Image (cartoon, rainbow, N blue to C red):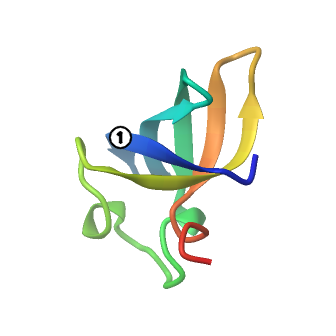
Amino acid sequence: MGKIVSITITKLVDFGAFCDAEIDGKIYKGLIHISEIADAYVTNVADYVTVGQQMDGYVISIDDSKDQAKLSLKRVSK
């Protein structure tokens, strides 16, 4: 947690974006909640990210038992 990792956006939904995140050599299914997309108030996730886009993400938490992670885009630059 607290790491900057490489992610690929896989799906956009009303409440955020799903991604694949490579963390310590392992691929996790990640969720970036809409509140973690940008510092500004986000109403449309597609205004900020697109499916297939590769970028850096900040790891908020990891659930190893489910191979899932919660990530942030807005915390990358902080």
Tag count:
1
Question: Dot 1: what SS?
Answer: strand
What's the residue at 63%, 27% (across, down)? 68
* Outermost residue to the bottom: 40
Judged left or right of residue 62, residue 13 is: left
The quadrant the C terminus occupies is: bottom right
Judged left or right of residue 55, residue 75 is: right
| Residue 13 x, y percent position in the rendering | 39, 47
Residue 16 or residue 66, whichever sits in front: 66
* Outermost residue to the front: 25
What's the residue at 51%, 63% (across, down)? 73
**Location of residue 62 with respect to 40 vertically, above or below:** above
Amino acid, disc 1: Thr
**Location of residue 15 with respect to 63 vertically, above or below:** below
What's the residue at 54%, 75% (across, down)? 77
| Residue 66 x, y percent position in the rendering | 69, 17
Q: Report which residue position mark 1 lands on.
A: 8
**Location of residue 71 with respect to 68 vertically, above or below:** below
**Location of residue 49 with respect to 27 vertically, above or below:** below
| Residue 27 x, y percent position in the rendering | 51, 23
Judged left or right of residue 69, residue 12 is: left
